[in-house]
Image: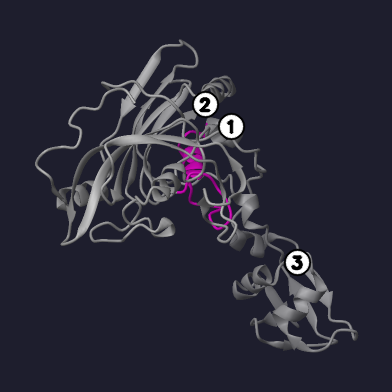
Amino acid sequence: MPHSLSQPDSDTPEPDLRTDVLSDPQTEVQEAEPRQLDVPASIRAGRLDKVLAQLIPEHSRSRLQGWIERGGVLVNGKAATVRQLVGPGDELTVWEEAAPETRAFSPEPIDFPVIAESPDWIVVDKPVGLVVHPGAGNWQGTLLNGLLHRYPELALVPRAGIVHRLDKDTSGLMVVARTDTAQTALVRQLQARTVGRRYVALAVGAAPAGGTVDKPIGRDVRVPVRMSVDRPIAPKPAITHYQATRQGLLGEKTVVSQLVCKLETGRTHQIRVHMASLGLPLLADALYGGKVVAPATRQMLHARELQFDDPVSGKLVQFSSPIASDMQAVMDAIDWDPVPTRPELPRL
């Protein structure tokens, strides 16, 4: 890599999630000891899911409905449906399933490319669409699950060695620690902002040659899944440096700028939020107002370059990855101006 880098895309890791590894819920329905419940006279007859919610209120109705649909609830010894009417005197047999989050750290055969590895770290080229860490709505099928399957020793490392993340629809390079010692060292580098990452982005609009966005980022007060620089909740400092390398036309009228971005801080959605705040939302980033123009179907952002100090030797190691194929297809479809905005990038 010809250029030096700096700054991580995330701050200190989040607290550990629980690491229980439980069996598949279908197996639990067959093997676990069922719970026997008699509907008392004090409960009015009604739909099975509603009555069950009154009898075991520690579980949500949606979870109970799932149990019923999967055959985990019997009424008087017979298979039941969610809308089935039950009342006083009916006997319910319930196989309680573990909540999905308790299976978050189960090994799974997830496919992902590994660029390089050592006894202390793994460099992953995360594909588009792969969630990095289990969370609400994505308790399984994540990069973490795949790491535990391919590298079983990561079960002994907090968060399976993950020290920073990329958004689900952002592709590119990540480093994963293989030991506690390596994880501690990498986290300290992230905190000291000596881990280097450079991103390539496609933004809608004509970008200036370059600049710096210094705007605190926090949760959007109106849309919880969004981050914001406009009256954010609990804002944290956020600084993004960017340079435009070329400009072109996608389709008949969509002006697109290719940017190289470097983060001085690492906040959730930082590049996406900061570019949108300049009126340059990333192409196809619908969450932040980016126009969706074929063939772009997700936010056009790729973590292309990575560097860090080896946790044991202290030697600087550097990596790069090719632009993801779908993003390259978009770049190939753009009619670029013949003269690049900035043909050679100096140190950011």
Disc 3 target residue:
34
Q: Which residue is drawn at 64% across and 82% down?
A: 81
Q: Residue at x 52, y 40 (%)?
A: 267
Q: Is residue 148 visible?
A: yes
Secondary structure of the residue carrying tag 1 is: loop
Tell me if residue 16 is in the magenta stretch. no
Taking depth in this image into account, of 262 and 80 the one nearest to the observer is: 262
Label disc, if present, on residue 12 of the rendered structure: 1
Check disc 3 and give the amino acid type: Pro
Tell me if residue 148 is in the magenta stretch. yes
Q: Which residue is drawn at 55% across and 58% down?
A: 137
In primary-sequence order, the first of circles 1 and 2 is 1
Residue numbers of the magenta segment = 131-152
Q: Quadrant of residue 310?
A: top left
Taking depth in this image into account, of 269 and 168 the one nearest to the observer is: 269
In primary-sequence order, the first of circles 2 and 3 is 3
Check disc 2 and give the amino acid type: Leu
Query: Which of labels 3 and 1 is toward the front?
Result: 1
Q: Can residue 117 be seen in this view?
A: no
In the rendered structure, the answer to whether residue 170 lies left or right of residue 187 reads left
Secondary structure of the residue carrying tag 3 is: loop
Disc 2 target residue:
190
